[in-house]
Amino acid sequence: MRPTTLIATGLATAAASVAGTVTTRSSLETWYPRLRKPGFTPPTPVIPIVWTTLYADIAVTSAVAIDDLREQGRDDEAAAYAAALAANLVLNAGWSWLFFGAHRLGAAAVTAGALAVSSADLTRRTAQANAPAGAALAPYPLWCAFATALSTEFWRLNRGSRLVR
């Protein structure tokens, strides 16, 4: 893996993480505690641990996949992978903005579903480039599928509340 590719994917995932964190921080202290929560909501301290691990996983496995595609002369696929990664990270940060920033739980649930599909596609692309890297990325779409179920249940429980737009 080339250091420059890892730096690029690391910066991209860090940007998505920072965007999500900035949007989330104030709502965690004020708005989020007042929401009705599903019984399967993870404890709040678990979430940043999971996401930090996943962002590191995304950065490393994506760098491996992009470099492997380039080394195999599959430059078009490497470019398509980079575009898929960018779209995935936009969806990722967008969910945080919709849920915590705009308090639009329905739109956040739909975005979480799109993120789960995008994450599965990114994992598929990774596995096609490098099977072990694809296996290492497999927890990402699983977590996003869980997040979709969780987001949908938050929306269901809080529809009609003055806390939700």
Image (spheres, rainbow, N blue to C red):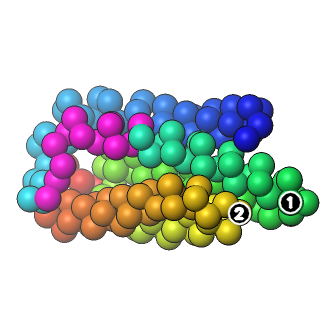
Relative image position of residue 161 (x, y in whole percent): 15, 57
What residue occupies the far front of the structure in this picture? 132
Three-letter amino acid code at disc 1?
A: Gln
Relative image position of residue 118 (x, y in whole percent): 54, 65
Q: Is residue 84 visible?
A: no
Residue 113 left/right relative to 152: right
Is residue 45 within the magenta segment?
A: yes
The quadrant where residue 109 appears: bottom left
Q: Is residue 165 visible?
A: yes
The local secondary structure at tag 2 comes to helix
Residue displayed at 85% across by 54% down: 70
What residue occupies the far right of the structure in this picture? 73
Residue 48 left/right relative to 80: left
Dot label at residue 129: 2
Is residue 37 within the magenta segment?
A: no
Specify the quadrant that holds the C terminus.
Answer: bottom left
Specify the quadrant that holds the N terminus.
Answer: top right
Residue corresponding to mark 1? 72
Residue 58 left/right relative to 112: right
* Nearer-the-camera pick, 18 or 139: 139
The quadrant where residue 13 appears: top right
* Nearer-the-camera pick, 120 or 16: 120
Q: How far apart are marks 2 and 1 (CA)?
A: 9 Å
